[in-house]
Image: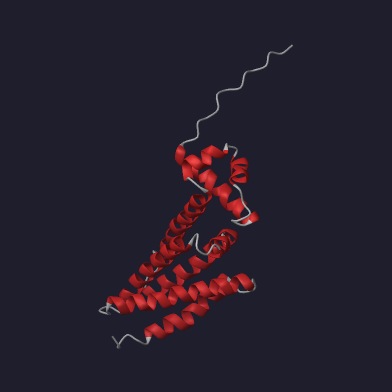
Amino acid sequence: MTAQTAPGPRRRVPRAEREQQIVDAAVAVFGERGYAGASMDAVAERVGVTKPVLYTHFGSKEGLLLAAIARARAELLEVITEAAAPAQDPESMLRNGTLAFFTYLDRRAPAWQLFCSEAGVADDALEEIRAQQTDFIAGLLAAQVPGTAPERLTGWAQVIVGACERLAVWRGQDETVTAEQATEYLMEVAWTGLAGLRGTR
């Protein structure tokens, strides 16, 4: 008989890697069952850990949802910044960043729709994403219209962020609208209008 080789010791997964695995599993389970219908047992089973491990890392199911939103916020800022950085002028920066926003939502559509549907639980976390995007766009506008009062730049940025959100909701209802089309609609209104305001501060 051939002697069986004893299995080697299981690799200890670093904390950061384990947390990423748990968040991945949570997003998948939330997307399949909805936040209310998802259980910590289902997430634990998906990861291959015990339920107490989830509570050790995130404290609660709500904590898991908020961790998923926080990761999305970081990812969104990264992809938009990377897309806007190579641009040679503020208009291209806004166009590239807007297209990156819609493209990111396409890749994360189920998770993003879940986050936006959790009124109350995720309101503060989603508002942080809006604030992040508002600050980023206000910086682009400051380069286009130097000397403009900060509150005016913030107001314009708020309009653009709100328009992007509504376009994203619309695209969720009409999948024939591409990321490129949505970007063009935004630029036709927001950028053309803002470009005409150069002399009015």
| Residue 78 in the image: above or below residue 19 | below
Q: Identify the residue at image location x=50%, y=63%.
A: 120
| Quarter assignment of residue 10 | top right
Image x and y of residue 191, in percent: 42, 80
Q: Is residue 84 left or right of residue 146?
A: right
Q: Quadrant of the C terminus?
A: bottom left
Extreme residue in the right direction: 1
* Residue occupying image coordinates x 50% and y 45%: 20
Q: Is residue 17 visible?
A: no
Task: Tell me which corner region of the image, top left, top right, bottom left or bottom right, holds residue 74.
Answer: bottom left
120 to the left or right of 42? left
What percent of the width, then of the height, locates residue 33?
65, 55
Residue 111 shows in this picture: yes
Above or below, 109 against 2 in this view is below
Along the line of sight, the residue nearer the viewer: 88 or 91: 91
The structure residue drawn at horizontal position 46% and vertical position 75%, both measured from the top left corner, is 162
